[in-house]
Amino acid sequence: QQQVKQSPQSLIVQKGGISIINCAYENTAFDYFPWYQQFPGKGPALLIAIRPDVSEKKEGRFTISFNKSAKQFSLHIMDSQPGDSATYFCAASRRNAGNMLTFGGGTRLMVKP
Amino acid sequence: EAQVTQNPRYLITVTGKKLTVTCSQNMNHEYMSWYRQDPGLGLRQIYYSMNVEVTDKGDVPEGYKVSRKEKRNFPLILESPSPNQTSLYFCASSLRSGFNSPLHFGNGTRLTVT
């Protein structure tokens, strides 16, 4: 079974809107939660990451919200742009397991002009 | 340019015919890893290597082999490919294995086994 569940599988947002992608995890030993962005024909690239000692991290238009008690975290893309159209993956890893990431199933985001 | 290079980009083969997908990085990274990407399942780790001559299984190692004889190269070997290994494969590397070292991915190899 997937240890990191991601939803929705696909998302269509109008330009300027807010895109929200959610992830839930089961393993309480996870303590590093990155998001990766993947454009067609390319490999994923790290977008933003959070550790559970903070509840929110913001970088430009991208924000991760983290709810430790609910074992959930989400990516918010403010003022979504057509250039944000990509597949987004959440991931998690255990303490001291660094880059041995467990990925969610991915969300294909389309931002309509 | 700093990059992870995979070859080939596309590969069509038949069941049982041994194949190798090459991966090379020019960033002097210690950590390298192979993932497969399947719709709805995200990326799943096949094998990883903490450093030269040190490799270990990921979540889905069955049917795959790897070797790390040099720091820059980490080939993925399918001794006897089967149709269930049809997938999109990614090689990735990072300076170290810790979470402060982001993974750098190659552009992928799309494998079809008939």
Image: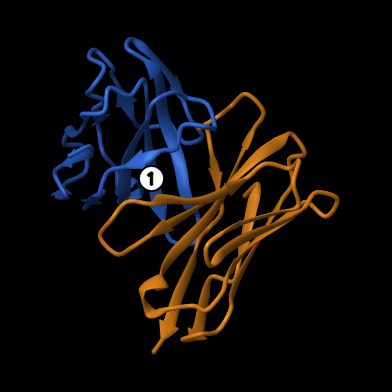
Chain colours: A orange, B blue
Q: Is residue A29 left or right of residue A97?
A: right
| Label 1 crowd bin: few (<14), some (14–19), many (20+), radius 10 Å | many
Which amino acid lies under the numbered mark 1 shown in the image of this protein?
A: Arg
User: Is any atom of residue B93 visible in this view?
Assistant: yes
In front here: B88 or B23? B23
Nearest the eye: B1 or A108: B1
Q: Position of residue B6 (x, y in %)?
A: 20, 40
Please state, as top left, top right, bottom left or bottom right, where the N terminus of chain B lies in the image. Answer: top left
Horizontally, is B33 left or right of A47 in the view? left
Count the numbered circles shown: 1
In the rendered view, does A32 fall on the left or right side of B113? right
Residue in the image at 34% along x and 37% along y? B92
Image height of B50 relative to B63, above or below: above
Residue at the farthest front position: A60
In terms of image quadrants, where is residue A53? top right
Q: Is residue B78 visible?
A: no
* Residue under the point 41% across and 26% down: B48
Counting from the top left corner in percent of width and height, residue B102 is at 45, 37
- Read off the residue under disc 1: B36
| Chain ID at mark 1 | B
Image quadrant assignment for residue B35: top left
Residue B112, x across and y down, in percent:
23, 53
Above or below for A86 versus A56: below
Q: Secondary structure at mark 1?
A: strand
Please identify the residue farthest to the top as the structure is shown. Answer: B53
Image coordinates for residue A85, horizontal then vertical, percent: 40, 73
